[in-house]
Amino acid sequence: MAEQYDVVIIGAGAAGLMCAATAGYRGASVLVLDHANKPGKKILMSGGGRCNFTNLNTTPAHFVSANPHFCKSALSRYTPWHFVELVERHGIKHVEKAPGQLFCADSSKAIVEMLLTECEWAGARVRLNTTVTHINDQPVGKPGSGRTEGGFTLRTNDGVVRAGKLVIASGGLSIPTMGASPFGYKVAEQFGLNVLPTRAALVPFTLQPADKAWLAELSGVSAEVRAEAGGRSFSEPMLITHRGLSGPAMLQVSAFWQAGADVTVDWLPMLADPYAALLEERKQHPNGTVERWLRSFFSQRLAAALVARFDWRGPLQHHANERLASIAAVLKGWRFKPSGTEGYRTAEVTLGGVDTGAVSSKTFEVKTVPGLYFIGEVLDVTGQLGGFNFQWAWASANALAETL
Ligand code: FDA
């Protein structure tokens, strides 16, 4: 005899657990299936182990999607304050590390424990180490199972489960070692939905050999920069690593960068006119150097490396105005062409995914397949860095569950 549930959710991550608890409270019998051996693995590793679980300044403008309107309804119905209220009800201490960015004061474990407690209180069951091989007697991903009437039959490594409603919350492709898989995209294709091309985002850049040669020696050095790609710019710290360029500034622009394009770095976003500042510095300290001047903004290592790389040596009085203007231009708009990104191995999120055109923004139900739903990162909705992706997981899960 197959087990029977009102709602079966695939994926015990942020969206899946939130949906399970909310649906359970509304009286549905709920089962969550996950192939991993632990629930909420990405929550555990997020925010450096302290989970940046929301952003108080969340707006639809913080999300990238082929349909920028899709996220509006869910975000307005479940705001960051709803989640803060839940977190506080569970006595979880939190801190605002940057404006609007809320983190656990202690450990992200508290968020997973909170979600599991909510599931337990709501009567929702979570089953791990479970792989779904077939949906409606079709191997997962084989196109053509078409519309369904009266629910879904799932064949798993642990028996057959019948679901009145099937929710796909299996996330994106980033960090495969943490359980990420293309499961959700395969289910979408099985039911004839469009899946938009995916790529890694919120991810460090790798460098061409010439840039790597001078930057790799600076591994561990960071600077407050303004980075720009694809018409979007972010003033945040940049971190130089032995593989390339990382830190919030680079992760943010990676979501707007297209392969083959340049990234522009303003090394001195705090200075509106570095040329004027250099002219003044030459007047005040004619025997001074560009390196000495740069040390008032950067670490000694970075100042020295910039001077060596662009050959800005010598006393300032030997630099003509045109030379100072060209130094200022490089500092204001250094361009590099990444060789690529570190990819899904280290990316925080996946851009693209299940085309939102097929899904109701109110209920998250697939328009052509009654009873089938997609929530969270598996959809083509990607937040910027700063707690927005979890807010999307909570909001989309809640929007679905409250319509059950
Ligand atoms: P999520 O990935 O959380 O869950 C998907 C679940 O589905 C997983 O449990 C997985 O095992 C399961 N699954 C996958 N394939 C399956 C299959 N075939 N069968 C069964 N189960 C399957 N965001 C943010 O807002 N603040 C932050 O601080 C961070 N930090 C961060 C750090 C790092 C290192 C990463 C990788 C990501 C972040 N993020 C983040 C992004 C955030 O973690 C992500 O957007 C959400 O977890 C997405 O929630 P979902 O529930 O959609 O997927």
Image: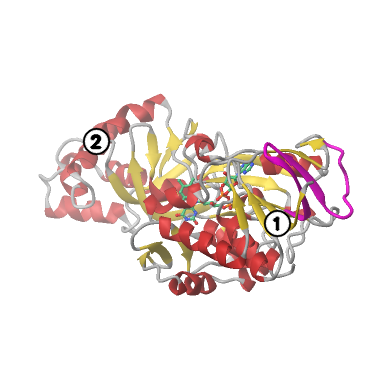
- Disc 1 target residue: 67
Residue 304 x, y percent position in the rendering:
20, 37
- Disc 2 target residue: 305
Looking at the rendering, in which quadrant would you find the C terminus?
Answer: bottom right
Q: Does the magenta stretch include residue 317?
A: no
Left or right: 272 as drawn, with respect to 386: left
Q: Which mark is residue 236?
A: none
Q: Residue furthest front?
A: 1
**Label located before the other in sequence (2 or 1):** 1
> What residue is shown at x 52% (from left), y 53% (from top)?
232
Residue 320 x, y percent position in the rendering:
24, 42
Q: In which quarter of the image is residue 25?
A: bottom right
> What residue is shown at x 40% (from left), y 46% (from top)?
265
Q: How is the image coloured?
A: secondary structure
Above or below, 376 against 216 in this view is below
Q: How crowded is mark 1: few (under 14 residues within 10 Å), some or many (20 or more)?
A: few
